[in-house]
Image: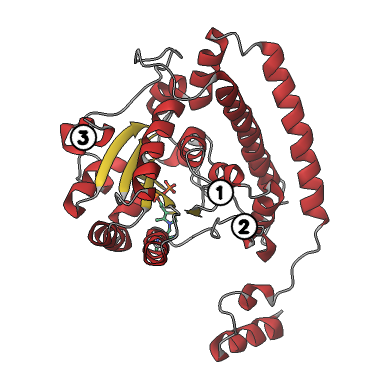
């Protein structure tokens, strides 16, 4: 039987490969070789530091707002690694890791959160859509793009990233329905980080798991340990290969935990306690990978120090470059909504300019 039959959502089993102590569950071995695993760990060290830097920049008034990925790195790194260049990524607003994995420069991500429209522009040939602030609307775009590709015979795959809260939105269900009916080459990656801002997952949907929501639409679904690089990669790779060969969509639920605030405008101490977070701390995706690499003789304090220093240096340079970009024009807020500005947008722009 295949992975999606073995772990059918109604069986209530979560797919895992790497235990929290860094050893493998399965005798089958790791799906990635040592070099790849170390390379991905290095990326994650960079991402975690770049994420922390963004939080600090916001606290210092040097960035408008920011939605940290802290704790969810593996969901994004493991899944993005299963994609190919040319595939399309539809992020929500917490996708620093997936964006960098696909080739979006860190400077671009920082510019976005600094309020510069340039931050929504992907380099030529990198198919990462801009941040989607409206919750859950972009899975529809991902399905539409996948459907178009199917009609044209393009062998691409689309992936939409969103949170558990988004699966309560009507748009999500419309997207899933279309994906099931048209068998589109699309992947729905839900990062179940246990919260939609302050609303815990348990009181936000009565569905036992998010993965189960796939069943109603005739789409494959799987719940994976979202802090387990090997499980996330394996499940996504299976979904990607299936989609590319005409087998249709998959809903992947990565079970993870948001360690940081929802955004820099949020104070999580208002709705969750330290005790509640305690069981999640040893499940930190980076810790698990570090333990695995150490066991294989690929990690040491010196390696960590080197990776941290290299990353820090690069991030500091990116901050300098991003802050050297001139402050955007007020017109930029309106210019890129449509190819041509509508009369209403023009009016709003003139109004804002006059007010300023
Ligand atoms: C359509 C819409 N409704 C409400 C909001 C306000 N809002 C921003 S994020 C968020 C919660 C999203 O939770 P989830 O989908 O679980 O993603 P997470 O933030 O946990 O990554 C809400 C309600 C919004 N941005 N868009």
Residue at the image position 64 percent from the left and 62 percent from the top:
121
Residue at the image position 53 percent from the left and 58 percent from the top:
131
Q: Is mark 1 on a helix, strand or loop?
A: loop
Q: Which of marks 3 and 2 is nearer the N terminus?
A: 3
State yes or no: discs 2 and 1 in contact (Cβ < 8 Å).
yes
Distance from Cα at disc 3 to Cα at disc 1: 28 Å
Q: Earlier in the sequence, mark 3 or mark 1?
A: 3
Left of 133 or right of it: where is 115? right
Distance from Cα at disc 2 to Cα at disc 1: 8 Å
Residue 85's disc is 1
Could you tell me which quadrant the N terminus lies in? top left
Question: Relative to the observer, which residue lies in front, 103 or 32?
Answer: 32
State yes or no: discs 3 and 2 in contact (Cβ < 8 Å).
no
Classify 118 as above or below 332.
above
Could you tell me which quadrant the C terminus lies in? bottom right
Classify 117 as above or below 198.
below
| Residue 334 at least partly seen | yes
Distance from Cα at disc 3 to Cα at disc 2: 35 Å
The picture places residue 140, in percent across and down from the top left corner, at 37, 63
- Residue 12: quadrant of the picture: top left
> Callout 2 environment at 10 Å: few (<14), some (14 to 19), or many (20+)?
few
Q: Which of marks 2 and 1 is nearer the N terminus?
A: 1
Which quarter of the rendered image does ligand 1 occupy? bottom left
Q: Can you identify the residue that label 3 sits on?
A: 5
Residue at the image position 74 percent from the left and 20 percent from the top:
306
Left of 48 or right of it: where is 282? left
> Callout 1 environment at 10 Å: few (<14), some (14 to 19), or many (20+)?
few
| Residue 90 at least partly seen | no
Q: Can you identify the residue that label 2 sits on?
A: 125
Q: What element carries label 3?
A: helix
The picture places residue 276, in percent across and down from the top left corner, at 38, 28
């Amino acid at each position: 039987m295949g992975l999606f039959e073995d772990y059918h959502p109604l069986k209530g089993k979560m797919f895992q490969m790497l235990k929290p102590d860094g050893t493998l569950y399965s005798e089958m071995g790791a799906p990635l070789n040592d070099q790849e695993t170390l390379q991905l760990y290095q990326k994650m060290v960079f991402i975690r530091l770049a994420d922390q830097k963004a939080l600090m920049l916001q606290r210092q008034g040097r960035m408008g707002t920011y939605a940290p990925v802290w704790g969810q790195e593996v969901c994004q790194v493991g899944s993005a690694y299963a994609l190919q260049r040319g595939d399309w990524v539809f992020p929500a607003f917490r996708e620093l890791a997936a964006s960098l994995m696909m080739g979006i420069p860190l400077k671009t991500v920082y510019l976005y959160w600094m309020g510069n429209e340039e931050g929504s522009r992907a380099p030529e040939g990198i198919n990462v859509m801009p941040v989607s602030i409206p919750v859950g609307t972009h899975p529809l775009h991902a399905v539409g793009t996948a459907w178009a590709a199917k009609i044209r015979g393009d062998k691409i795959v689309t992936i939409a990233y969103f949170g558990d809260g988004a699966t309560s939105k009507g748009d999500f269900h419309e997207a899933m329905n279309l994906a099931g009916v048209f068998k589109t080459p699309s992947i729905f990656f839900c990062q179940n980080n246990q919260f939609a801002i302050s609303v815990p997952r348990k009181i936000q949907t009565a569905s036992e798991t998010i993965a189960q929501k796939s069943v109603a639409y005739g789409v494959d679904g799987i719940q994976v340990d979202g802090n387990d690089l090997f499980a996330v990669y394996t499940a996504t790779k299976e979904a990607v290969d299936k989609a590319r060969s005409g087998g249709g969509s998959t809903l992947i639920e990565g079970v993870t935990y948001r360690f940081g605030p929802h955004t820099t405008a949020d104070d999580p101490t208002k709705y969750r306690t330290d005790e509640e977070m305690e069981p999640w701390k040893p499940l930190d995706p980076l810790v698990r990978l570090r333990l695995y690499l150490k066991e294989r003789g690929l990690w040491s304090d010196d390696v960590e120090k080197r990776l941290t220093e290299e990353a820090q240096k690069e991030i500091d340079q990116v901050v300098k470059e991003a802050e050297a970009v001139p402050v955007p024009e007020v017109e930029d807020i309106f210019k890129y909504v449509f190819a041509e500005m509508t009369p209403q947008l023009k009016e709003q722009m003139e109004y804002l300019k006059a007010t300023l």
